[in-house]
Image (spheres, helix red, strand yellow):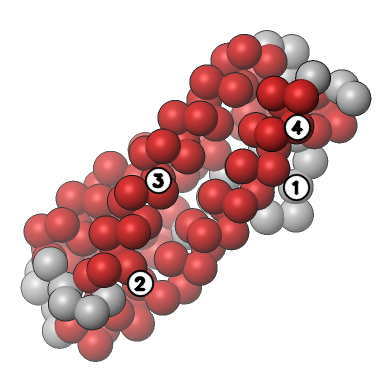
Amino acid sequence: MQIENILTSEVVDLTSLKSFFSSDKDSLIQLVTVYLSDTKPRLALLKKSMDNVNYEEVRSICHFLKSSLGLMGVSCLEEITSLEKRAQNLDPEPIINERLQPITKVLDESIVEYQRILDQLQAL
């Protein structure tokens, strides 16, 4: 299987990855591995914040994730930016939770998808 055949997805937009790394398997593996290792623990903290909002933690995680979501083609960049501002403004917990739910769903889906891609790349 060729790299081009692996870099297909209905979940994430792989345009940036294809344009920069379509022929560099090792860099793709490294990039996806870093995305997964950075995103999984932060997603867990965001989910924990749904029970008891830690505004600074939510703001900090959103700020961190903004840099990787664009490159990795994850579709919640605008929502993350909005949530970061809402956490910074100390919006009420119900509003933070309402914004967190779709973000955590998209991040969960991206993790599953990138794990699939990583497994296939490593099998090449």
> Callout 1: few (<14), some (14-19), or many (20+) C-alpha neighbours within 10 Å?
few
Q: Which mark is residue 100?
A: 2
| Residue 20 seen by the camera | no
Q: Nearer the viewer, residue 14 or 34?
A: 34
The first of marks 1 and 4 along the sequence is 1
The residue depicted at 69 percent of the width and 34 percent of the height is 119
Q: Amino acid at mark 2?
A: Leu
Q: Which residue is mark 3?
A: 39
- Rendering quarter of residue 89: bottom left
Give the percent coordinates (x, y) of residue 69.
46, 44
Q: Which mark is residue 120?
A: 4
Disc 1 and disc 3: Cα gap in Å? 19 Å
Circle nearer the viewer, 1 or 3: 3
Quadrant including the C terminus: top right
Circle nearer the viewer, 3 or 2: 3
Q: Is residue 82 above or below residue 15?
A: below
Q: Amino acid at mark 1?
A: Ser
| Residue 11 seen by the camera | yes
Disc 1 and disc 4: Cα gap in Å? 13 Å
Q: Which residue is mark 1?
A: 9
The residue depicted at 76 percent of the width and 24 percent of the height is 123
The residue depicted at 54 percent of the width and 39 percent of the height is 72
Disc 3 and disc 2: Cα gap in Å? 15 Å
